[in-house]
Image (spheres, rainbow, N blue to C red):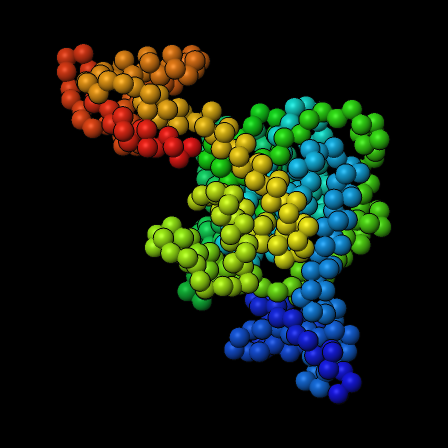
């Protein structure tokens, strides 16, 4: 086998979905899996002396090459059928690639298409889900459909999610972006003693793409990367029939993505622990990070984007994939994500009532007692908020001040409640935004 050494390069597929009883259900006669580690080994083109299956995998860099080809194909398909902003193509294309590997990450962002009527959101959503891993579009899915199905889910006309009575579905969708989130239901099971109730457990982590006209409510929207579509005048795009599934480039791209998915490198668990160590060293111990890893340069680049909390959860999977595919893909995505996050923070600053309340308090000059009713009046003047439904009232202001810890002291008087505001804390908080 000396002449076949080049074929002994291994590519490991941990947590192989075909693993059963130490063998591969996909290649039962040729592929072996280590029973203890459940690591599934393939080699390229020929069967080696250990009887591993011949398959498609070369070295990691060749897998990267196939992913790069698939990525460029996705960009071409998107540009043919959808008129997106230039900065949105890298985000959407990398997200589509990511649906094939989302299970390997701790979280995976939702993609939200927001557009006025006639802007091509349904076409774009359909194309995205068709290119994605096991994608399908549903209108107004039920809770049971969400947790009993797998693959990439597209939800069109998703305005219904924010309606009254849809709280349970909304809560379910709020958890689908993070690995390990589960739903438990009771079901009847027949036994020799009769029927008994048993717990049935469902893993709800999955890629999710949504589209609507009216926008997304805050909690679910915080888990989304938002793509805004404008009405296109490009006749060469909007007059095309939606027959991309018949095109060779589409068929070849799906083959490439499915081929790579079966035997791509795992996302290392250390990716997250190394990131935490990098952040801890940089900001807590205030020392130079000396433990160099494969991803140190990635961490430095991400850190310069000034991401926090949920933003890291949303961006790290996409940035990691782009980093692995090619330097050029990473540069394009880095620019697009950085621009998007800056706009997102500004939008949150402008729209978030909590942030606006912090901003208002930070600009106060007096620290004497003030009535909560007076704060309501000042806040409405400050924000020019249309309070026709009386959403901003003394109760909301009182809860917000408590939640934001902006109250130094509080007392009850004949006219209601008065507080002394912590102006310095408000000034420190507003710097975060």
Q: As displayed, is residue 421 above or below residue 97? A: above
Q: Is residue 137 visible?
A: no
State the quadrant of the C terminus.
top left
The residue depicted at 55 percent of the width and 63 percent of the height is 294
Up the image or down, 136 lies above or below 34; here it is above
Q: Is residue 422 left or right of residue 260?
A: left
Residue visible at 54% across and 37% down in the picture: 341
Residue at the extreme front: 288
Q: In which image quadrant can residue 358 be found?
A: top left
Image coords of residue 314 (percent x, y): 52, 45
Residue at image position (43%, 59%) is 289
Quarter that holds the N terminus:
bottom right
Observer-nearest of 391 and 430: 430
Between 228 and 32, the one lying in front of the other is 228
Evaluate whether residue 167 shows in this view.
yes
**118 shown above or below 308:** above
The residue located at (48%, 43%) in the rendering is: 307
Q: What number of labels is visible?
A: 0
Place of residue 224 in the rendered image (x, y in percent of width and height, measured from the top left)? 54, 39
Residue 189 drawn above or below residue 151: below
Residue 73: x and y in percent read 77, 49
Coordinates of residue 20 in the picture (x, y in percent): 59, 73
Q: Is residue 15 left or right of residue 350?
A: right
Q: Is residue 249 left or right of residue 342?
A: right
Work out whether residue 390 or residue 196 is closer to the camera in this orientation and state it.
390
């Amino acid at each position: 086998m000396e002449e076949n050494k080049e074929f002994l390069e291994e590519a490991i597929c941990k947590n192989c979905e075909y693993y059963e009883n130490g063998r591969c259900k996909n290649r039962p006669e040729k592929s072996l899996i280590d029973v203890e580690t459940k690591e599934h080994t393939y080699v390229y083109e020929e069967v080696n002396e250990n009887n591993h299956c011949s398959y498609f995998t070369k070295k990691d860099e060749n897998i990267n090459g196939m992913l790069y080809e698939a990525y460029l194909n996705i960009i071409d398909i998107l540009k043919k059928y959808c008129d997106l902003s230039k900065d949105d193509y890298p985000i959407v294309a990398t997200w589509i690639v990511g649906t094939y590997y989302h299970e390997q990450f701790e979280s995976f962002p939702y993609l939200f298409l927001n557009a006025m009527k006639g802007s091509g959101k349904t076409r774009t959503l359909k194309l995205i889900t068709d290119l994605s891993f096991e994608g399908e579009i549903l209108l107004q899915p039920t809770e049971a459909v969400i947790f009993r199905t797998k693959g990439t889910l597209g939800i069109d006309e998703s305005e219904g999610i924010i309606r009254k009575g849809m709280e349970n579905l909304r809560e379910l969708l709020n958890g689908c972006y993070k690995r390990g989130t589960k739903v438990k239901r009771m079901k009847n099971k027949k036994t020799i003693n009769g029927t008994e109730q048993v717990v049935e457990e469902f893993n709800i982590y999955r890629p999710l793409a949504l589209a609507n006209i009216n926008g997304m409510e805050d909690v679910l929207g915080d888990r989304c990367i938002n793509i805004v579509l404008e009405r296109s005048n490009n006749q060469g795009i909007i007059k095309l029939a939606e027959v991309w599934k018949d095109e060779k480039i589409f068929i070849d791209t799906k083959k490439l993505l499915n081929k790579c998915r079966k035997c791509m490198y795992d996302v290392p668990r250390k990716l997250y622990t190394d990131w935490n160590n990098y952040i801890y060293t940089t900001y807590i111990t205030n020392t130079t990070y000396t433990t160099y890893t494969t991803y140190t340069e990635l961490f430095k680049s991400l850190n310069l984007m000034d991401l926090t909390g949920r933003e890291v959860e949303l961006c790290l999977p996409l940035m990691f994939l782009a980093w692995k595919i090619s330097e050029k893909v990473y540069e394009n995505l880095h620019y697009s994500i950085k621009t998007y996050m800056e706009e997102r923070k500004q939008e949150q600053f402008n729209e978030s009532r909590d942030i606006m309340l912090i901003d208002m308090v930070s600009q106060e000059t007096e620290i004497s007692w003030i009535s909560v009713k007076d704060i309501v009046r000042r806040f409405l003047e400050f924000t020019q908020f249309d309070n026709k439904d009386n959403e901003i009232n003394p109760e909301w202001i009182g809860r917000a001040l408590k939640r934001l810890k902006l109250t130094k002291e509080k007392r009850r008087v004949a006219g209601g409640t008065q507080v002394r505001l912590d102006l310095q804390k408000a000034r420190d908080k507003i710097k975060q935004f």
